[in-house]
Image (cartoon, helix red, strand yellow):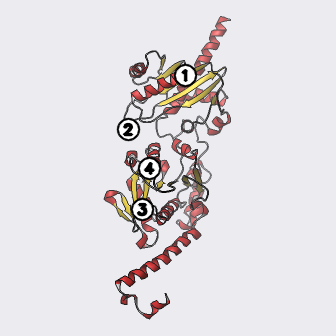
Amino acid sequence: MKNLNAYSVSSLTDEKQDQLFEMLKGHLKGWLLIFWKILGRPDQKAPETPWNIWLILGGRGSGKTRSGAEWVRAQVRGGAKHIALVAPSFNEAREVMLEGESGLLNLGYPRERPRYIASRHRLEWPNGAVGHVYSAEDPDGLRGAQFDAAWADEFCAWTYPEDTLSNLRLGLRLGEDPRLVITTTPKRTPSLLKLVATKGVHISQSKTADNAKYLSPGFAALMEENYGGSPLGKQELDGEILSELPGALWTLQGISDRRVEAAPELDRIVIAIDPPTTSGPRADACGIIVAGRADDLIYVLEDASFHRAAPADWADRAVALYHHYRADAIIAEVNQGGEMVEACLAQVDPNVPVLTRHTNRNKRSRAEPVAQAYRRGKVRHAGRFDALEAEMCLMGTDSLRHSPDRADALVWAVGELMVEKVEQAVARMRWV
């Protein structure tokens, strides 16, 4: 370096200038790496313990985007060649993950930064690494692709979170240790609760206040003054997953307190289905719940619900469960398409008893007696059903954004067993 004082850079040959530039770039890259290691908070750095998914839950402006972008940069420096970048939409991917102040196009030394080819939704780094941008509005766009690293942003705002996440994880099959980083402001959605409970997920949490010095003066204080301590503040500022929501018919704590590992011998078992009214890639899920009764207690045995449920598929599954559990009947909601439901089940097995149920009450009114039975300790879950339980804890709140198909089927199953028990008791009284 000291020999550089003897002549100007312009006097060097092109080859020498390139060598000099590469040398300086190497020094600067090292300093940039040290700079982030010093300034980045512990919650913004990848955990040292083994993990498959690093879930970063953060309040608004807490620095979670910077965490995701810096992790991607580290993967590119480490040799990753195919990186998936997934956002709620292509526009949000570009505005936040790429062109945002902490986006990939604005971090690091200029010659190290990738270029974005908008027409192909593609990032290209100088070292040959490629980033593929995807929208959670189109889960099938991830089919067939493969990666050695992935960054997913604002998971709780995804249109099709479960389908998109499953396709993304199936594509993480390159390299020695493919991993996924998810950054999001948490919302109490079934998909997030299911993700939190997934094996191999490491969770980091950060608050808006943790990053206050990098935000507009007074922003954190103003937000704390207006929303601090409220459910919205705990979610949007503190990055917390709310344990209870105003108006919710169930709580996770109430369900967990009475959970059992297995059900005893049961007197009666039913399969309840809440079939979708349409089919195809964007159809609602088909809620399918197995429940049984032993004396005065009701046990939930299985959540067999699934998405994109064509009539032939849900009929096959319901009948298979009927035979597997040696159930007494299939309970089917027939508010819409009653004859179609019975016909689909009869095509699979005409000998299966089907009890059709119709109601004019809304979902909350129908669910309240069942929720009351839970509160009285009359219902047990024989195992963990994360997606079902998350949906139950959203029933009756403003946070429920889709049809609660799992919870609806649960209400039909448990409600049927409750009614049968009451009818038996009345019959005994009349006999006496």
Residue at the front extreme of this rendering:
176
At numbered mark 3, what does the secondary structure look like: helix, strand or loop? helix
Give, as a three-letter code, the residue at label 2.
Pro
Please state the horizontal and vertical placement of residue 17, each as a whole percent of the image.
39, 83
Which residue is located at x 58 percent, y 37 percent?
248
Q: How many marks?
A: 4
Alpha-carbon neighbours of circle 1 within 10 Å: few (<14), some, or many (≥20)?
Answer: many
CB-based contact (under 8 Å), mark 1 and mark 3: no
Q: Earlier in the sequence, mark 2 or mark 4?
A: 4
| Residue 147 visible to an observer of this rendering | yes
* Mark 4 to mark 3 CA distance (whole Å): 21 Å
Mark 3 lies on residue: 98
* Mark 4 to mark 1 CA distance (whole Å): 38 Å
Mark 4 lies on residue: 171
Which residue is located at x 53 percent, y 52 percent?
185
The C terminus sits in image quarter? top right
* Mark 2 to mark 4 CA distance (whole Å): 20 Å
Q: Residue 202, labelled with which disc?
A: none
Question: Viewed as shown, does residue 94 lie left or right of 421?
Answer: left
Give, as a three-letter code, the residue at label 3.
Leu
Q: Earlier in the sequence, mark 4 or mark 3?
A: 3
Q: Earlier in the sequence, mark 1 or mark 3?
A: 3
Front tag of 4 and 1: 4
Mark 1 lies on residue: 270
At numbered mark 1, what does the secondary structure look like: helix, strand or loop? strand
Mark 2 lies on residue: 281
CB-based contact (under 8 Å), mark 4 and mark 3: no
Give, as a three-letter code, the residue at label 4.
Gly
Give, as a three-letter code, the residue at label 1.
Val
